[in-house]
Amino acid sequence: MLATRLIATTSSMDQMLAPLEQSVVPALRSVLGESRTLIPLHQPEFNGKERAFLLDCVDSTFVSSVGKYVNQFETMLTEYTGARYAVAVVNGTAALHMALKLAGVEAGDEVLVPALSFVATANSVAYCGAVPHFVDSELLTLGMDPVALDTHLVNIAERSQGAVRNRFTKRRIAAIVPMHTYGHPVDIEPLMELADRLSLPIVEDAAESLGSTYRGRHTGTFGKLGVLSFNGNKIVTTGGGGAILTDDENLACRAKHLSTTAKIPHQWAFIHDEVAWNFRLPNLNASLGCAQMERLTEMLQRKRRLAERYREAFAGNAAIEFVAEPSHARSNYWLNTVRLTNPDKSVRDCLLTAINNAGYQCRPTWTLLHRLPMYAECPRAPLPVASALEASLINLPSSAHLAGELWP
Ligand SMILES: *Cc1c(COP(=O)(O)O)cnc(C)c1O
């Protein structure tokens, strides 16, 4: 009985999948060529001055959190993004954790985060002793849906004791954390309006969107604070690293202070004026980052070209659609993504197996955060779009070098 049912399921799956697989694998082959070994999802490139800067850093003996490259890296970040201040730290998660603290998130608060995100977005809330409150995403941007959020807050929020509260849990809602998924800018303007109306700070998780802009302005510079990541899989890497962006001088000073054990500068005395962290980015990592930043513009051009090739390869395919940048925005196309027109996890998984077996490393999107055991009891909005996206998104190999030479 069980066996027949399994066979029936498998063969109907084959029927659904066969045409899909037959169109997707050749589409990937047309963009990426035949693959002999697995083509990875995303590889860093060190074709610039990385080695020279690293050696110079070692020779200087300033390999830890003091040194010229840390300052230079921060300057490069402010010049590139247009933020007034950038504070470099050990990773994007630590940056988010600090940014939430600096935005005023306290133990016992709730923070609105997208259910469709990398786990660090929720973890950083939990590190503050606060509770993530999961909200839905938009099909077009893959990011937080401002209209759905507004509706949800009408249903669950109230103003009492000088704060916006969840009327069911009575906890204060302390911040909103939109995230720019795979580099595609979220629809930030209506989110800013909503946040302003409720006097809630926005902390932008721009970990994936260095190089992406919304109406010409760099992502991560809209909120009170924004956060970048320079992990090895991101568009620019320092090995491990992150940064806080802000226009607020006071917050920037606080960020620097809190990331360096809150030590009061003094010729010799060890005076620390609060419990703080050792989160400052080492000079060694920053030296890599300076070399990487020099190549960012060219990197973005090649990633756009790769995205354009994917878009063409999937054009006219009714079952699968390339996720293009929203019209209001320019994406860094960090991870190229396709979406099944009919969301279905088992079809998605069969397709993932077929594509990976063909030599192209592909991944599904993240498991929605409210499904993870530690966040299962957290408050959440209805999540119809995030659930559909979870069952339909597939990331494709996205290393810049896959676009070939820019000017052959
Ligand atoms: C990478 C990432 C982070 C965390 O960055 P790390 O540098 O890996 O700590 C946070 N949020 C999102 C959405 C990310 O993709």
Image: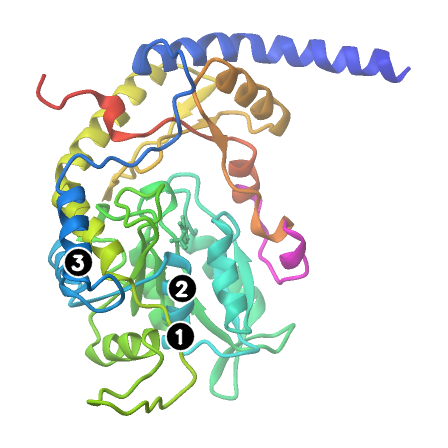
In this orientation, does residue 151 appear? no
Residue drawn 17% across the image and 63% down it: 83
What span is colored magenta in the figure?
A: 372-385
Q: Does the residue at mark 3 contact the one at mark 2 (Cβ under 8 Å)?
A: no
Residue drawn 79% across the image and 16% down it: 6
Identify the element where label 3 is drawn: helix
Q: Depth check: 160 or 121 in front?
A: 121
Residue drawn 13% across the image and 42% down it: 49
Q: Depth check: 385 or 81 in front?
A: 81
Q: Does the residue at mark 3 contact the one at mark 1 (Cβ under 8 Å)?
A: no
| Image depth: mark 1 or mark 2 in front | 1
Residue marked by disc 1 = 277
Q: Answer above or below: position of 47 versus 360.
A: below
Identify the element where label 1 is drawn: loop
Residue marked by disc 2 = 94
Q: In which quarter of the image is the N terminus?
A: top right
Whichever of callouts 3 and 1 sits on the residue coming sooner in the sequence is 3
Residue marked by disc 3 = 73
Residue 390 in percent (x, y) is at 54, 38
Identify the element where label 2 is drawn: helix
Residue 154 in percent (x, y) is at 52, 66
